[in-house]
Amino acid sequence: MDNQKLVEMLPPVTDANRDFWEGTLAGELRLQYGDSGTPRYPESPVDPVTLDADFEWRAASGRATLWSWIVMHQKYFPAFAGEVPYLVAFVQLEEGPYLMTTLADPPEHLECGMPLEVVFEQISEDRAIPKFKVVSG
């Protein structure tokens, strides 16, 4: 995979998402929590329930379940041209939010509801991306 092209595809680091990206470098998947106590991802300037602008970032458990997936056979993105076919996964975090991601070392057989845990792949000096792996045993 061309990591430089992958970095270019990612959203820029901003004041709004800096805690998320710093968390990935620290090995934490961080979510925003507002006054309602509802975790949110992606980040948002206001709590979707209370519309309050106050929030804090908290580390998620890192546990998720496989909700859906697709195997991509087309070269839609230059960063993934050498990876075709590759897997895109839609996972539900234990805390509730959904995340589009990929699986690290996916097994041949996948099932909806499989337990997963987050792992991080550092793709540049200042970026790491969350991926998930199947929890064995």
Image (tube, rainbow, N blue to C red):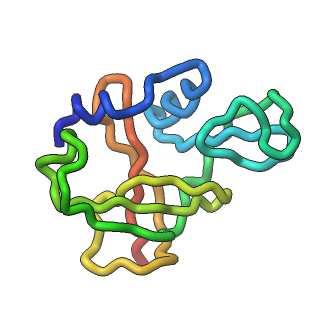
Q: Is residue 38 above or below residue 64?
A: above
Question: Observer-nearest residue: 2 or 137?
Answer: 2
The image quadrant where one finds the C terminus is: bottom left
Q: Nearer the viewer, residue 104 or 53?
A: 53
Q: Quadrant of the N terminus?
A: top left
Residue at left 61%, top 24%? 16
On the image, the x and y values in percent for residue 35 come to 86, 39
x and y percentages locating residue 79 in the rendered image: 21, 40
How far across and down, in percent of the image, does residue 22 sit? 50, 28
Q: Depth check: 67 or 20 in front?
A: 67
Relative placement, left or right, of 12 versus 110 is right
Q: Quadrant of residue 128?
A: top left
In which quadrant of the rendered view does residue 93 lie?
bottom right
Above or below: residue 32 compared with residue 88: above
> Which residue sits at x=17%, y=37%?
2
User: Is residue 80 depicted above or below 102 in this figure?
Assistant: above
Residue at 25% x, 61% y is: 72
Q: Position of residue 51 (x, y in %)?
A: 84, 36
Residue 75 located left or right of residue 22: left
Q: Residue furthest top?
A: 15
On the rendered structure, is 68 left or right of 53?
left
* Residue occupying the point 61% across, 45% down: 41
Near-viewer residue (50 or 76): 76
